Image (spheres, rainbow, N blue to C red):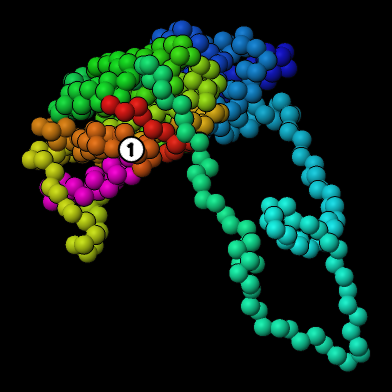
Amino acid sequence: MDQRHREILRRHRSSLVTTLDTADICDGLLSKGVFTQDMIDEIQNKETRRDRARALLTDLETRGSRAFRSFLECLRETGYHDPAGLLENGDGAHPPCPIPVQPSLIPLPVERPKYTEDPDRPVLIPLTVVPLRPGTLPVPKPFSPSYEEENLKPTRIRRDSIQTYKMDANPCGICLIINNVEFEPGSCLKDRNGSNIDCDKMETRFKALNFKVVVKRNLKCKYIRHEMSTLAKEDHSLYDCCVVIILSHGTEANHNRFPGAIHGVDAGVVSVQIITNYLNGQNCPSLQGKPKLFFIQACGGDEKDIGFEVSPDEVQPSMGGADDQTDAMPMSSSSDSLSTSDEPDARATLPTPSDILVSYSTTPGYVSWRDTEAGSWYVENLDRVLEQNADTDDLVTILMMVNDAVSQISAKGLYKQMPGSFNFLRKHLYFQKP
């Protein structure tokens, strides 16, 4: 780090130590390559919040010329706008204003095509001006194109201009499934009965789609990060795709692109945005240009959607199971079988979001329903639609079918659920035929 930046950090060290919560900052510094996971673990092992902040600032001074600017970005992304402003004012660096470039205008000659027997090669002749007698105007003739003129009009050929991802590697890629079922007693989160059914369905389905499936169960928050880091360090050169499926409790979270956060079994949270960052083009070069797919079965908040009335022709309603629950943190001690929402956290930028798709079981801010006997509505329908349509339809079409199927279901005859996705894919994606 430049000596000038070190002096700025030291000048504001007292204020930063008082203000910062390293849990907000460390994930962003990890995703930007400033800190390693070992450094973060050492910082987080300090006893007090102030000690953790001091350790972070001390380590930051040793991390190269980009560390200061990356730290400013992380501060803004996590809501520390005032400290970021103080540090940047001390830096005195302001990006130059771009100079607008005016395009040069080149006049084009006016020509009229004259079609010959070969319509693909027009012969061009110059326009001629016919002088008119004073006081006279030309009288237009009725338009009646000849058969030849009608058939010489250029036609637009309809074609699919969107390319398709290569998906023929054997195996096609790695599919990581994180299945959190049993939560620690002090977490205030209920066990997710029925999630093993979801896990078994997804494991069987993606094996049938020629993926190498890895299943991890009951992970604490830091181990979710560890598994994602391990996956990012794999060599994916021989693969065409990577899939991550997370089955857990969840919650709302601040974000730049991908909302929501996932609970570990210890009630800690890691944001969906941080999870996707592990596999983006910057952090996992062997997956650059290849599709990275995330399927999230978790609550996006604690709101319950009661829907709105429509004509019976619009829907074919179906009832949920006898014991529908939500993948959310309980907000009350209600005696019925409903729980409530999943929680938010970390915010890190996604510098290279291309080729990423995140499919959520529910709308951000709302609960996601799970039948304790049959599994979650979302996974049940995702598995069914993949079974029926994976060999004919692209992924985006498949997810619309899942959206429609889940939207027809009602929990206790009242509550609704609407899945959705954040799609940064650039091409059609077709899975290998089962």
The residue under the point 58% across, 33% down is 82
In the rendered image, which quarter contains the C terminus? top left
| Left or right of residue 385: residue 324 | left
Q: Magenta span has 388?
A: no
Q: Position of residue 303 (x, y in %)?
A: 28, 45
Q: Eyeballing the image, is 335 above or below 233?
A: below
Residue 155, position in %: x, y?
A: 58, 57
- Residue 57, image x, y percentages: 57, 15
Q: Is residue 141 above or below residue 396?
A: below
Magenta-drawn stretch contains 410: yes
Look at the numbered disc 1 and give the secondary structure of its residue. Answer: loop
Please identify the quarter of the rendering in which residue 92 is found: top right
Taking the spot 15% from the left edge, 28% from the top edge, the residue there is: 194
Q: Quadrant of the N terminus?
A: top right
| Pick the front one: 142 or 200 | 142
**Is 364 on the left-hand or right-hand side of 255?**
left
Relative placement, left or right, of 162 versus 90 is: left
Residue hosting label 1: 392
Segment colored magenta: 398-419
The residue lying at 52 percent from left, 22 percent from top is 288
Instruction: Say if residue 301 shows up in the picture.
Output: no
Most extreme residue toward the bottom is 135
Q: Is residue 95 visible?
A: yes
Residue occupying image coordinates x 81% and y 48%: 103
In x, y percent, where is residue 235?
46, 11
